[in-house]
Amino acid sequence: MYKGVIQKGLLLLLIILLGLLIYLIKLSYKENNDDKTQNTTSTVKTTSTQTTTTTTTTVIPETTTTAETTTSNPTIYSPYHVEPYDSYSIDNISSEEIQRIFTEKRAVVAGDSMAEGLTAYQILDESNVVWHRGRRIDNMDKDLEKIKELNPNYLFLTYGSNDLELWTGRITSFINAYTKTLDMLKSELPGVTIIINSILPASAKKTSNEPAFAYQEEFNNALKELANNLDIPFLENSPYLLNKEKPYSSDGVHPKSFYYSLWAKHMTSYLETL
């Protein structure tokens, strides 16, 4: 009797052990599959990360290049408004001829700090230039005595930058002041031929910071119309700022040294037609 009970107990224990073994095998198989799944997911994630990183790496240089192009874009230094060349070509004018022809023709440039650049860069000497920083067309009569002392046959007027700041868009007031000065000069300097130099544009950066300089085009057009109506020669000097990446000094108004020689050649070219 006891023997039969023991045999049944052993059989039951064997069944339990066998079931436990099967359970452990299944559990091990499941864990292995989970590990494989995790590895596969990790691989996919890694691949995705690498792809994203690669794409990002490709985009960054393009963004940087765009930023660099914007920073070095010469348009922020280019003139606000430039007119076409006029008929007085400088192609056949040498630097040596400038002073000689100005002297022979007894030509004088009168103006503001733009005119100062002609002597500062030794393009012309003081016998051909009368300048004063801050001068405008409405108060240039303060330099009349100096001009008379030089006894010119030809007088180039170089005013405008300070006038833009004074009149701030009041074009009619500017033209009235210019007309009054021209009448005064004709009375005080009979027989002297007067030539008007164009108002140079300021840089776009200067124009955006100081809106008064945005009226350069309108002022120049009105000044050209005045010159044409009075049969006064008008020299358009703004083209000599073209094709220069940074033609202006730090103030955005005065050109760098290269300009003054070109401008002087332009005035000389006019004198050679006389």
Image (cartoon, rainbow, N blue to C red):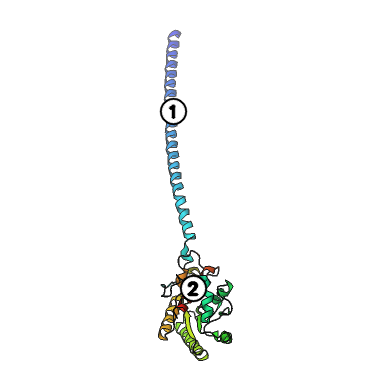
Nearer to me, 40 or 227: 227
Seen at 43% across and 10% down, the residue is 7
The reply to whether residue 25 is visible in this rendering is yes
Tag of residue 135: none
Residue type for callout 1 = Asn
Q: Position of residue 196 (x, y in %)?
A: 47, 81
Left or right position of 88 against 103: left
Which marked residue is nearer to the observer: mark 1 or mark 2? 2
- Quarter of the rendering occupied by the C terminus: bottom left
Residue type for callout 2 = Lys
In this view, the residue farthest toward the bottom is 187
Q: What secondary structure is marked by label 1?
A: helix
Q: Position of residue 96 (x, y in %)?
A: 53, 71
In the rendered view, would you say 21 is above or below 124?
A: above
Tag of residue 265: 2
- Quarter of the rendering occupied by the N terminus: top left
Nearer to me, 122 or 212: 122
Q: Position of residue 62 (x, y in %)?
A: 44, 52
User: In the picture, residue 82 is in which quadrant?
Assistant: bottom left
Dot 1 alpha-carbon crowd within 10 angstroms: few under 14, some 14 to 19, many 20 or more? few
- Residue under pointer 1: 32
Q: Disc 1 to disc 2, how far (Cα)? A: 90 Å
Q: What secondary structure is marked by label 2?
A: helix
In the rendered view, would you say 107 is above or below 14?
A: below
In the rendered view, would you say 32 is above or below 85?
A: above
Dot 2 alpha-carbon crowd within 10 angstroms: few under 14, some 14 to 19, many 20 or more? many
Task: Answer with mark 1 or mark 2, whichever residue precedes in sequence.
Answer: 1
The reply to whether residue 210 is visible in this rendering is no
